Amino acid sequence: MNNLLKRFCAQQSGATAVEYALIAALITVVLVAAIGPLSVALTETFEEVANAIPQTVP
């Protein structure tokens, strides 16, 4: 039983998986935070382009 506990504590693969999960979560938070202002800027840009095109009705 003591040997099993030592091997469990020495195993690093679980810690690596947790680290990758934390990195993925951090990247997700950054992307979500960046999408808000980016979507507003894109909407404003497309509205400016749409307003610059002359509207003709046949």
Image: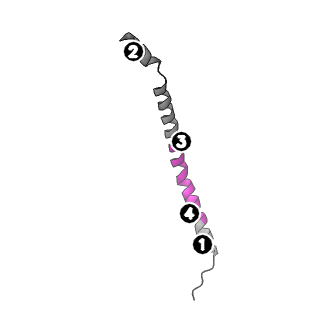
In the figure, 40 relative to 19: above or below? Answer: below
* Residue type, mark 4 in image: Thr
Do callouts 1 and 2 mark residues in contact (Cβ within 8 Å)? Answer: no
Residue 49 in the magenta stretch? The answer is no
Residue at left 49%, top 23%? 12
Looking at the rendered structure, the number of numbered marks drawn on it comes to 4
- Magenta-colored span: 27-45
* Residue type, mark 3 in image: Ile
- Main SS of residues in magenta: helix
Tell me which label, 1 or 3, sits earlier in the chain: 3
- Of the residues tagged 1 and 3, which is closer to the observer? 3
- Residue 13: % across, % down: 48, 26
Do callouts 2 and 4 mark residues in contact (Cβ within 8 Å)? Answer: no
Q: CA distance from mark 1 to mark 3?
A: 33 Å
- Residue 11: % across, % down: 47, 21
From the viewer's side, name the closer residue of 51 and 17: 17
Q: CA distance from mark 1 to mark 2?
A: 68 Å
Local secondary structure at mark 2: helix
Do callouts 4 and 1 mark residues in contact (Cβ within 8 Å)? Answer: no
Tell me which label, 3 or 2, sits earlier in the chain: 2
Give neighbour class at mark 4: few <14, some 14-19, many 20+ (Cα, 10 Å).
few
In the figure, 14 relative to 10: above or below? Answer: below
Q: CA distance from mark 4 to mark 1?
A: 10 Å
In the figure, 53 relative to 43: above or below? Answer: below
Q: Quadrant of the N terminus?
A: top left
Q: Which residue is mark 4?
A: 43
* Residue type, mark 2 in image: Leu
- Of the residues tagged 1 and 2, which is closer to the observer? 2
Q: Which mark is residue 27?
A: 3
Q: Which residue is mark 2?
A: 4
Q: CA distance from mark 4 to mark 3?
A: 24 Å
Q: CA distance from mark 3 to mark 2?
A: 36 Å
